[in-house]
Amino acid sequence: MRLGYWTPVYGGFLRNVGDEGMPATWDYIKSLSQLADRLGYDTTLVPELYLNDRKGLQAPSLEAWSLTSAILATTERLRVMTAVRPGFHLPAVTAKESSTITDIGGGRFALNVVAAWWEEEAKQYGGRFTRHDERYEQAREFVEILRGTWGETPFSYAGDHFTVQDTILEPKPRVVPAVFAGGESEHGRESIAGFADSYALHGGTVDEVREKVDDMNERRLRRHGLPFDEFAMSAYVIVRDTEAQARQELERITTVDPSSPGYASFEEFVRNSQLDVELSKREYSVGTRGLRPDLVGTAEQVAERIREFRDAGVTLLLIQSSPAHDELERIAVEVGPLLR
């Protein structure tokens, strides 16, 4: 099990807490990235959202691809997994950007292809918003063009969503970026088994995660004859000296503030997603169902729980925590040695 974390592009992770001490600035992201690099974290996920769905539409948020280049240029070992939403990008241009970014990072770059759900954001930024099942067809075509241009010159492709003709992409990436993707509907799972290298999960219970890992490996074995390379799971982590202190912190961050602007997108997220579990506002308070794994307690309790997810098939834990600079250090120092 390798440990990673989410880069807080929106100034934090909590919808019920205003100032988390994680400003949406490059200075903060640079400091956090270099700290995580020194602490030995394996991967950071840089989410791509042009509007802030944690702190409210008016709150600042940073752009993922600019950050990716900067993080890679100022770290030495940290892999950067960058979210990309096909409705906001041209695939051949993304392939070109990826080749350059891979060179900057010495191969420490991966993609997380996201079937975007936020219709309001697409309206504001001119993205192509497609309905649920069609999003995964769009994503499949997007990835096929990425891989085609990374591997062939010239490359042509004619799809329902994207078309390129005699595309020349040089230089090719020396290390082809891994492609992650996540989805829970039947159509989403089957599509991802066809076009992705690795699977990204929202948080779940051990049994839920084990079912998904087994199901997705079975699908990919049927499609490609090989299991997925990696299984990454997002989770919010709280480590304290006692379980009571950890539970007290959990209560603090999940006490729902009905007036919080961070819930403006809740109904739209639920409406435009086909989730396989019911989601409450309390659970949504940190996003990506990060509370569901219940990684809350002492270092020993959290480490034991992480080992259960490792045994269920998770290979990469993508941590959310607040404030990230303090909590990532605490997790690395107190939990990390218990996992080795």
Image (tube, helix red, strand yellow):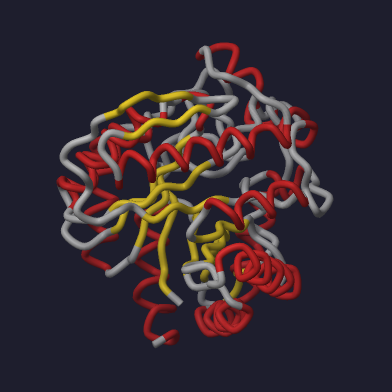
Q: Write the residue at 52% across / 70% down.
A: 239
The residue closer to the viewer here, 147 or 295, is 147
Reply above or below: 5 against 337: above
Reply above or below: 121 against 334: above
Q: Write the residue at 36% across / 52% down.
A: 110
Is residue 294 visible in the rendered structure shown here? no
The residue closer to the viewer here, 255 or 64, is 64
Image quadrant of residue 40?
A: bottom left
Percent across and percent down for residue 141 are 53, 36
Percent across and percent down for residue 233 are 56, 62
Is residue 114 visible in the rendered structure shown here? yes
Q: Write the residue at 23% across / 39% down.
A: 69
Reply above or below: 183 against 156: below
Q: How many marks?
A: 0
Image quadrant of residue 208?
A: bottom right
Image quadrant of residue 98?
A: top left
215 left or right of 224 in image:
right
The residue closer to the viewer here, 262 or 7, is 7
Percent across and percent down for residue 274 are 78, 43
Q: Quadrant of the C terminus?
A: bottom left
Q: Write the residue at 20% across / 39% down.
A: 100
5 left or right of 65 in image:
right
Residue ranking furthest to the right: 278
Percent across and percent down for residue 76 are 16, 59
Reply above or below: 30 against 269: below
252 left or right of 88 in image:
right
